[in-house]
Structures are given as C-alpha cells and as structure tokens.
Image (cartoon, helix red, strand yellow):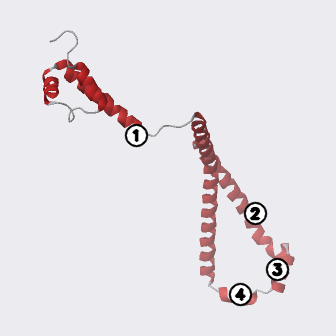
Amino acid sequence: MRLGICSFEKEVIQALKDGHWPEGCSQELRGHVAACAPCSDLVLVTQAFQRVRSESSHQELPGSPGLLWWRAQLRRRNAATEQIGRPITIAETFALMVTVVLGIGFIASQYNHGLRWASWCSEVTLSRALHLVSMGSSAMNGNLSLLIPGLGMLALIGGLVLYLVTEKS
C-alpha cells in the first residue's frame, strides 16, 4: 500500500475530467490504473459520480415555487370537488334505480291488465286530458292515497341512503 499521492493521479483526474477515460488514454496510464489501488478507486468513484450527475441532469426540474404552489392548490381543489360530487353521484344513481324499478313495475302492471297502449293513444285528446285534470279529487282520490305515502317513503329512503353514504366517506 502506498502512502501519499500517486504520480499519475493528476493525469488520471485530467483524463476523467475531459471524458477521455479509458478510450482516449495511453496504454501505460490504463495499465497503471489497473495496478494502482488509489488510482483505480479514484476512477471508480469519479465514474459513479459522473453517471449520477448525467442521470440527474436528464430529469425534469420541478419548476418555480409559484408553479408548484399552483399545482398543489389545483390538486386540493380537485380533491374537494370529487369529495363533494360523490354524494350527488350516488343520489343520481339512486334516483335512476328508483325510476327503473317504477318503470318496470308500471310495465308489469300494464302487462297483467293487457297491453292496450294503442287504444290509449286513440282515446287521448286535448279536451279529454283537460277534463281528467279538472276532475280533481273525485277521480284521483284513490290514487293520491297511495301516491303521497309512496313519495314520502321514497324521500325518506333517499335521505337515509345519502346520510349513510356521507358518513362512510
């Protein structure tokens, strides 16, 4: 083991700095580095640092502090919007499911009573529709007794579903 500085150290440092190692160096210098432990360690460490520096220089810089702050604010706003929109999406899905179930129930009801949709269209005229609307409570009394509690239950179940969904998130 040698104590002190190797006589070829300056040449090895210059070759590494200029990027000539090992192709642009003399055979004598390469042979010395292979035999000299401090010079071979110097080459190994310098090449490792150069490799890391070249890899890090190819990476994209994060940008200015203002840009980083703006991106963070944008992410925060997007997260808040997503969190607020989640119960609304669930309420819309629930409303869609209720509509589909009611539609299927209506179609099943009409199927059981016989499908007479073509006769409905021929019977419906503007004067007849206005007459049905003006008849009021006498014709609709039985239907309203089922419709109002049904709408109340639907509102109650919808509110319960929204409450349970917002509690979990």
Which of pointers 3 and 4 indicates the residue nearer the eye?
Answer: 4
In the depicted structure, whether residue 62 falls above or below residue 90: above
Residue 98 has which mark?
A: none
- Of residue 15 and residue 4, the one placed in the foreground of this image is 15
Q: Name the outermost residue toward the right.
A: 134
Amino acid found under the numbered disc labelled 1: His
Q: Residue 69: x, y in percent?
A: 60, 36
Q: Residue at x 50, y 37 (%)?
A: 62
Earlier sequence position, callout 3 versus callout 2: 3
Please name the residue that numbered disc 2 is placed on. 148
Which of pointers 3 and 1 indicates the residue nearer the eye?
Answer: 1
Q: CA distance from mark 4 to mark 1?
A: 73 Å
Q: Residue at x 60, y 63 (%)?
A: 97
In the depicted structure, whether residue 154 falls above or below residue 55: below
- Of residue 123 and residue 11, the one placed in the foreground of this image is 11
Earlier sequence position, callout 2 versus callout 1: 1
Q: Residue 63: x, y in percent?
A: 53, 37
Determine whether the residue tagged by mark 3 lies in a helix, strand or loop.
helix
Among the 4 quarters of the image, the one containing residue 32:
top left
The reply, left or right, for residue 150 in relation to residue 93 is: right
Q: Residues within 10 Å of mark 2 (few under 14, many from 20)?
A: few
Q: Residue 161: x, y in percent?
A: 62, 51
Please name the residue that numbered disc 4 is placed on. 121
Q: CA distance from mark 3 to mark 1?
A: 77 Å
